[in-house]
């Protein structure tokens, strides 16, 4: 099982960074291996498809565990995913309208040809996440994306708290708090 932790500072307010990240269908704009992400209709469940070996794409479903507006979002793969993974992204407001974006991803590649491909993709997962974060930074800093105009807050119903499966209050007793404090040795591998 692998685990990656990376951060980047973005020259944009936390609201903009959070809104852009939680508009999951934007991911192909800054994640080079992602073909698409689509909402499945189940509250908080999203279908991911990434580029695979020899033209075969790899897909899985992931469920949003929690969303704390302008603070954190977390997820885990579901339903016998081809690539089991889980993670969290936290957003820390800094001075001068800057935001620190922290990413933690755990993954467990499958066996066989797909596993070999996933191993190739993740042969240097730190570099891949760094590149994706840099692309995210470029997109946020240089796009005309407007918070609240055409953006989602993760999935339909999120504004009302629908589909969240955990308490998203920031307290030492919940995983959003622990994920926000990345030094905490919390288990984000629940879906793996």
Image (tube, rainbow, N blue to C red):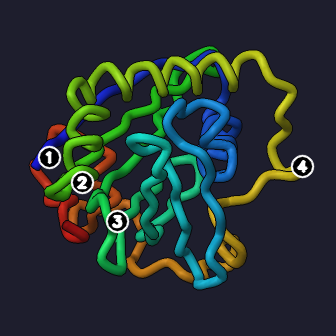
Q: Which residue is mark 1?
A: 184
| Mark sitting on residue 76 | 3
**Marks 1 and 2: CB-CB under 8 Å?**
yes
* Residue 12 percent coordinates (x, y): 67, 23
Whether 108 is drawn above or below 19: the answer is below
Q: Earlier in the sequence, mark 1 or mark 3?
A: 3
Disc 2 versus disc 3: nearer the observer: 3
| Mark sitting on residue 149 | 4
Disc 4 versus disc 1: nearer the observer: 4
* Residue 28 percent coordinates (x, y): 62, 39
Residue lying at 60% horizontally and 45% vertically, measured from the top left: 35
Q: Secondary structure at mark 3?
A: strand
Q: Left of 181 or right of it: where is 50? A: right
**Marks 2 and 4: CB-CB under 8 Å?**
no
Disc 4 versus disc 3: nearer the observer: 3
Spatial separation of the CA atoms under disc 4 and disc 3:
27 Å
């Amino acid at each position: 099982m692998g685990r990656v932790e990376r951060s980047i500072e973005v020259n944009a307010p936390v609201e903009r960074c959070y809104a852009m990240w939680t508009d999951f269908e934007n991911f192909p704009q800054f994640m080079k291996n992602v073909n698409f992400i689509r909402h499945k209709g189940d509250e908080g469940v999203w279908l991911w498809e990434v580029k695979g070996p020899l033209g075969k794409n790899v897909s899985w479903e992931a469920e949003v565990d929690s969303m704390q507006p302008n603070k954190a979002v977390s997820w885990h793969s579901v339903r016998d995913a081809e690539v089991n993974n889980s993670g969290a992204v936290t957003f820390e407001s800094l001075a001068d309208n800057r935001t620190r974006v922290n990413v933690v991803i755990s993954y467990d590649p499958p066996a066989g040809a797909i596993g070999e491909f996933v191993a190739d993709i993740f042969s240097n997962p730190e570099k891949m996440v760094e590149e994706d974060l840099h692309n995210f930074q470029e997109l946020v800093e240089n796009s005309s994306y407007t918070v609240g105009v055409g953006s989602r807050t993760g999935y339909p119903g999120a504004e009302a708290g629908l589909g969240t499966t955990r308490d998203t209050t920031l307290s030492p007793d919940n995983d959003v708090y622990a994920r926000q404090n990345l030094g905490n040795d919390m288990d984000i591998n629940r879906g793996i």
